[in-house]
Image (cartoon, helix red, strand yellow):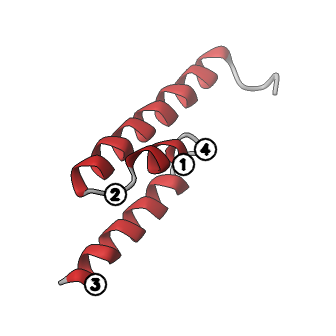
Amino acid sequence: MDTIAWWGYRLLAVLVLTQALWIFHDARKRGENAWLWGLLGLLNVPSSLLVYLLVTRRKKRDRN
């Protein structure tokens, strides 16, 4: 872990928080469980975002 500089950790923290906030707001707008999706967005970058997009977009397509 010594190979990653302090700015790397800060960049990772900003990416994770930004992703979680975007997922939270988008889930709230779509009527999904925003708190659950937002917490899942805090786990890692970008796989949480990809899972969210696949699940919510598939639900929308299935409803139509």
Residue positioned 17% across, 84% down in the render: 64
Q: Are marks 1 and 2 in contact (CB under 8 Å)?
A: no
Which quadrant: the N terminus?
A: top right
Amino acid of disc 4:
Leu
For marks 1 and 2, give the one nearer the viewer.
2
Q: Which residue is mark 3?
A: 62
Residue 17's x, y, as percent? 47, 31
Q: Quadrant of residue 24?
A: top left
Labels 1 and 3: the sequence-earlier one? 1
- Tell me the CA gap for discs 1 and 3: 23 Å
Q: Which residue is mark 4?
A: 43
Q: Are marks 3 and 2 in contact (CB under 8 Å)?
A: no
Q: 62 or 19, which lies in front?
A: 62
Q: Is residue 41 left or right of residue 23?
A: right
- Tell me the CA gap for discs 3 and 2: 15 Å
Residue positioned 38% across, 36% down in the render: 21
Amino acid of disc 2:
Glu
Q: Which residue is mark 2?
A: 32
Residue 59's x, y, as percent? 32, 75
Residue 6's x, y, as percent? 66, 15
Amino acid of disc 3:
Asp
Q: Quadrant of residue 61?
A: bottom left
For marks 2 and 4, give the one nearer the viewer.
2
Q: Which residue is mark 1?
A: 40
Q: Is residue 14 above or below residue 40?
A: above
